[in-house]
Amino acid sequence: MNKFFTVCLLSCVNLLSMAQNSQRFKNEVFSTIDSLKNIQYGEAINIKNEPEKLFLDIFSPTNDTLKRRPLVVFVHGGGFVNGDKGTGYPTLFCTGLAKRGYVSSSINYRLGIGKPKNDTSYFEAMYRGVQDAKAAIRFFRKNAEKYGIDTSKIYIMGGSAGSKVAMHLAYLDQNEVPSYINTANLGSIEGKSGNEGYSSKVNAVINCWGAMIDYRWINSGDIPLFSVHGTADKTVPFDSSYTYHGFKYGSSILYNRALSLGITTGLKLFEGSGHTLDNDKNKQKQALDEITLWLSAQINKSKNSAGISRFEKEIQEFEKLDKIESYSSDAILVTGSSYIRLWKSIKQDLAPHEIIHRGFGGSNIAEMAYYIDRILAKHSLKAIIFYSGSNDITGSNQDKSPTQVLEAFKYIVQKVKLKKPETNIYYISISPNERRWSVQDKIIEANSLLKNYCQSVPNLHFIETMPQLLSKEGKYQPELYVADKLHFNDKGYQIWSAIIKKTLDKDFGSESKRK
């Protein structure tokens, strides 16, 4: 009996551990955390020309069995003149991260702005913060075994001024430091705040209501970036409409820059919210939910995961077709992921409309954003139809919430309108299927957000297909899909194409207008 009880108990523990690990890094799986306060990680000369000891706090899950955990280092805000590692949202974020299975740390760094207070002195204050934050990263690499750190998964995060420190740590190289900055006095950007001999590199950066001095310091091949910002922020711009002492380029500009370069990125905007999301804890917790959804995908990515260039051959093939195929200005370009690529009868199904077929299967919406200029380059079009976003919400990495799919689509629309301002743009709603039914609620949410956006922009249209693809009971219909339970069979495409063709006939007529 005792042996049987022991076996059952071990089985229950194993099941609990498996369930915990499946949610770890995204959701809170630990109810209590341990904290270590005021640990010295370095020392440096401050603005008063005095040595200043540098301290940090560490938060980790209680009774965690995982020996090597991802680390998030948080840099507090306060305009480079005040703030502290142990107050306000730094504590909220750090405890929330620890409950999700991370080791997190909130650091103090040298504060103070020289005189006169101008763009140069603010840059120098940020520069000292970068030097100290680098020392903190090195401290954890030096003491990785002691604190249970996975040194291949170290991330930097900050709020306001701390976010400026975090982003410039990630993206500013020594040779990019402006010539008007006196590095002879400040030293190298790596600094001498402590723990020399260890790397200060991080694997991603999380920007909370911060900005950069120059967005061009983000370059192809740089580390991933996630940003959170309120659109009514009057302290630090979420766009580039004003400057905070030289910090001009906010979250939306940095997000667009990352997308254009194929850097993994995400954005969560809070409409009408001010700086620090109005210090609203509920909003800040929502922000953390978005951050950890995205960050967990970065953690779980294989080291061998293909980068942004994985569809380069397909795009080059499109470019070859553009040279040998001829289309009129009445053509409609249809592009997207595997639902489009596998639609072999598309030209017949949508006839007499002139169709340019450009699907690249398995693609996500960030890849569509990266390649859209090249897909459009050679065409004068009457309309463009997109099907993209399904793989972001429901694919293996699942790094985008419905809100982030919307933000990426907004970027695509901006790119299209910049080059082809009068062209009609259509978005086909994300389709239901058996294999991804567990996230049907996210698909519905994404479709709702995308539909509302389309209704608010001229020449932007949403093609609703969900009702016709569901049964009367609101369930997926297995008879519409091939054996993989994901992609349409002929019957599924018949329903899909009938809806899309009806929309095109209504908007452009059912007679061919090919010139």
Image (spheres, rainbow, N blue to C red):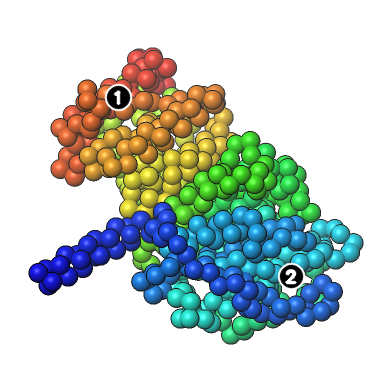
User: Mark 2 or mark 1: which is in front?
Assistant: 2
- Residue 219 appears in the rendering: no
Determine the residue positioned at 54% across, 76% down: 140
Pick whichever, 502 or 329, lies toward us. 502
**Local crowd at mark 2 within 10 Å, few (<14), some, or many (≥20)?**
many
Position in image of residue 32 (x %, y %): 45, 62
Pick whichever, 278 or 425, lies toward us. 278
Tell me: 55 left or right of 395: right
Q: Is residue 500 above or below residue 136?
A: above
Tell me: 174 left or right of 284: right
Of pointers 2 and 1, the one earlier in the residue sequence: 2
Local SS, label 2: loop
The residue indicated by pointer 1 is 467
Pick whichever, 267 or 183, lies toward us. 267
Tell me: 483 left or right of 117: left
- Residue 474 appears in the rendering: yes
Label of residue 110 in the image: 2
Q: Are marks 2 and 1 in contact (CB under 8 Å)?
A: no
**Local crowd at mark 1 within 10 Å, few (<14), some, or many (≥20)?**
few
Tell me: 118 left or right of 97: right
Determine the residue positioned at 31% across, 34% down: 431
Specify the farthest residue to the right: 116
Specify the farthest residue to the left: 1
